[in-house]
Amino acid sequence: MHFAIAVLVFVVVTLAAFAGLSLLDERNAQARLLRDRLSESQKPAEQPLQDVALVRDEMLSRIPAFDAVLRRSERVSLLQKMLTQGNVNVRAGNFLMFCVVGAAAFGLLFFIAGGNLILGWAGAILGFFVPYAYASHMRQKRFQRFEEKFPEAIDTLARAVRAGHAFTTALEMIANEVSEPVAGEFRQLYEEQKFGLPVRDALINLAERIPLVDVKFFVTAVMLQRETGGNLAEILDNLSYVIRERFKILRQVRVHTAQGRLTMVLLMALPPTIVVIMLSINPGFIRPLFTDPLGHALIVVGITLQTLGYFFIRRIIRIQV
């Protein structure tokens, strides 16, 4: 109970502090914005304009004070990049708040269920990383869909170039004809070069947003062709063929590693399944595992070994092609 009260007090005080700081910082930000606009309007015409970014940086939080704090951390910027890659429409600041709420909820649940502070802290750590696991899963699924549709986009680009269309026009055709998520990425590529960004820089941005091997091959091939010349349609046809052949090999690898993946699933699901069955059949036999301090230590050791086994088996069955 004391742990729950401490967590609630911490959350309330933190939210109140951020709310107060945000009100002060918002008023300062509005005054600073007004001064910047006045200074821009009073600049002489002979003064050269400074280089500006094509796309304005996204805010990490709607609270100005929280946004200023988060921008100082490189890890938070990487987190926002991961959320964008996974098409998770949540700002990094709100996502961190979800992680805190998840940690508080899981911590209270584990503490009430087990009646032990160690279990409460274990649940808090688990709850904090649950949203991150969800975002990572969404990112991986989006990359997989992109890989499946990417050869189709390359074929469309090759046909458009062979028909006499310009490279930039072919990018717009991909954005209009190919399904998501390929269409969205190529639409952003087209709009970046349309608004003045060099094609080379726009292609590099595409490779940074989608850090896949096939995309890097595509960007490298297009940049080399634009610098040295050659038949772009033929290059794209060969690249599409290579990507499809790699997918065939990957499917064969998945067939040969099916036994290892099934073993991993069984080993991960067997202990919790046995615990649930024993709780329903003979609760008195399994209850000391949750009430006795030695049982708590055994739970921690078991979860640790299960996690290590999962990563070891995954490393064995994960073959790079």
Image: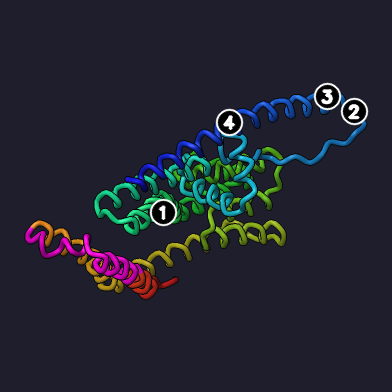
Gap in Å between the C-alphas at discs 3 and 2? 10 Å
Considering the numbered disc 2 on the image, is that residue within a helix, a strand or a loop?
loop
Of labels 4 and 2, earlier in sequence is 4
In this view, the residue farthest toward the left is 281
Gap in Å between the C-alphas at discs 3 and 4? 32 Å
Instruction: Point out residue 126 in the picture as x, y percentages from the top left corner.
Output: 37, 55
Q: Mostly what secondary structure, the magenta segment?
A: helix
Q: Amino acid at mark 2?
A: Ala
Q: Is residue 141 above or below residue 172?
A: below
Considering the numbered disc 4 on the image, is that residue within a helix, a strand or a loop?
helix
Q: Nearer the viewer, residue 286 or 152?
A: 286
Tag 1 residue: 129
Gap in Å between the C-alphas at discs 1 and 3? 48 Å
Considering the numbered disc 3 on the image, is that residue within a helix, a strand or a loop?
helix
Can residue 246 be seen from the camera position used here? yes
Find residue 41 and name its label: 3
Q: Amino acid at mark 4?
A: Gly
Tag 4 residue: 20
Q: Are marks 4 and 2 in contact (CB under 8 Å)?
A: no
Tag 2 residue: 45
Instruction: Point out residue 291 in the picture as x, y percentages from the top left corner.
Output: 21, 60
- Horizontally, residue 146 falls left or right of residue 81, namely left
At label 1, counting other C-alpha atoms closer than 10 Å, the crowd grade (few under 14, some 14-19, many 20 or more) is some
Q: Nearer the viewer, residue 17 or 125?
A: 17
* Residue shown at 22% from the left, 64% from the top: 292
Quarter of the image that includes the C terminus? bottom left
Of labels 3 and 4, earlier in sequence is 4
Give the foreground label among 4 and 2: 4
The part of the chain drawn in magenta is 281-307
